[in-house]
């Protein structure tokens, strides 16, 4: 089924809590479970642990958080808990990690990027100046620079996905994108709320996607580049 958990994620061992998926059927359930899980893991016992190596000024840490060994945090990073950040993660300058986020081992978050209420499997990477909101990134998934996973519809109604001509309500008005294992979203691409992208897909740069993208697809917009003669004008200093 195109909404089932195994369709998108076949490497549950690339997650620090593999038993967490017991009983799950749909990929969208991952997001629904993240906040209550972090409440039990971090908020109730009031965990505030940072084992990272700091490069530059200390990060701004709020709420409850756990940051694992071998992780490197550069200057001007903000972490707003509850948030879990695993081992050997790299968080570049100016990045913001917002509540409800779980980042597995060996991931990276690029300069100026924002990750909000999202789950990243092991090896997932977010490049610079991207927004990942209410989304799930599979093992070794890649988010290019300037990518936006739009996470709320204009009318603020629940996100939906249409499969076989039937529209399915995803049960929340905040829902970004499900991104399967080893899928790449190229620079400045945008996914609309509720998008599900199968594993091993390439979403080419500056491409807008929505709905369900089956596994192992290349998705791109046919290029149409126009050129016209231009006058020579010396620009002011």
Image (cartoon, rainbow, N blue to C red):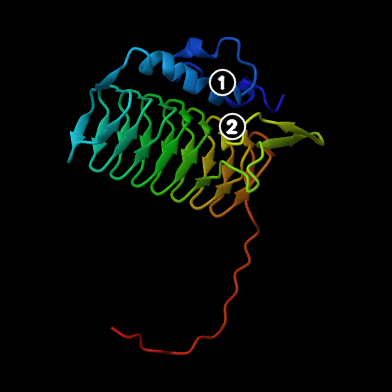
> Which mark, residue 95?
none
Few, some or many residues within 10 Å of mark 2 (<14, 14–19, 20+): many
Residue furthest to the right in view is 165
Q: Secondary structure at mark 2?
A: loop
Residue furthest to the left in view is 56
Left or right of 155 in this view: 14: left
Residue placed under numbered mark 1 in the picture: 10
Using the image as rendered, state which of residue 119 and residue 216 is in the foreground. 119
- The first of marks 2 and 1 along the sequence is 1
Left or right of 66 in this view: 17: right
Q: What quarter of the picture does the N terminus occupy?
A: top right
Relative to 76, residue 11 above or below: above
User: Residue 6, image x and y in percent?
Assistant: 62, 20
User: Residue 5, image x and y in percent?
Assistant: 62, 21
Q: Secondary structure at mark 1?
A: loop
> Which mark, residue 199?
2
Marks 2 and 1, Cα distance to the nearest angstrom?
A: 9 Å
Few, some or many residues within 10 Å of mark 1 (<14, 14–19, 20+): some
**Point 48% across, 89% down: residue:** 231
**Point 41% across, 89% down: residue:** 233
Quarter of the image for residue 102 reads: top left
User: Residue 40, image x and y in percent?
Assistant: 42, 13
Count of residue discs = 2
User: Residue 137, image x and y in percent?
Assistant: 50, 32
Left or right of 36 in this view: 221: right
Q: What quarter of the picture does the C terminus occupy?
A: bottom left
Query: Badges 2 and 1: C-beta atoms under 8 Å apart?
Result: yes
Quarter of the image for residue 82 reads: top left
Relative to 172, residue 156 above or below: below
């Amino acid at each position: 089924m195109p909404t089932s958990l195994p369709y998108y994620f076949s490497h549950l061992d690339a997650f620090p809590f593999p038993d967490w998926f017991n009983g799950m059927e749909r990929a969208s359930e991952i997001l629904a479970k993240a906040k209550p899980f972090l409440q039990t893991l971090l908020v109730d016992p009031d965990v505030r642990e940072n084992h990272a190596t700091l490069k530059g000024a200390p990060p701004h840490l709020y709420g409850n958080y756990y940051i694992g060994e071998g992780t490197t945090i550069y200057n001007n990073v903000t972490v707003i808990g509850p948030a879990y950040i695993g081992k050997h993660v790299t968080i570049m300058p100016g990045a913001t990690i917002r509540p409800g986020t779980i980042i597995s081992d060996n991931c990276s978050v690029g300069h100026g990027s924002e990750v909000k209420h999202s789950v990243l499997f092991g090896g997932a990477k977010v490049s610079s100046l991207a927004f990942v909101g209410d989304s799930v990134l599979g093992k070794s998934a890649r988010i290019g620079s300037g990518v936006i996973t739009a996470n709320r519809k204009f009318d603020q109604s629940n996100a939906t996905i249409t499969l076989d001509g039937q529209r399915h309500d995803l049960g929340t008005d905040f829902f970004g994108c499900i991104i399967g294992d080893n899928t790449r979203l190229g620079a400045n691409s945008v996914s609309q709320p509720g998008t599900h992208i199968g594993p091993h897909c390439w979403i080419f740069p500056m491409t807008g996607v929505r709905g369900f993208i089956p596994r192992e697809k290349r998705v791109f917009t046919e290029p149409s580049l126009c050129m016209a003669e231009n006058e020579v004008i010396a620009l002011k200093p």
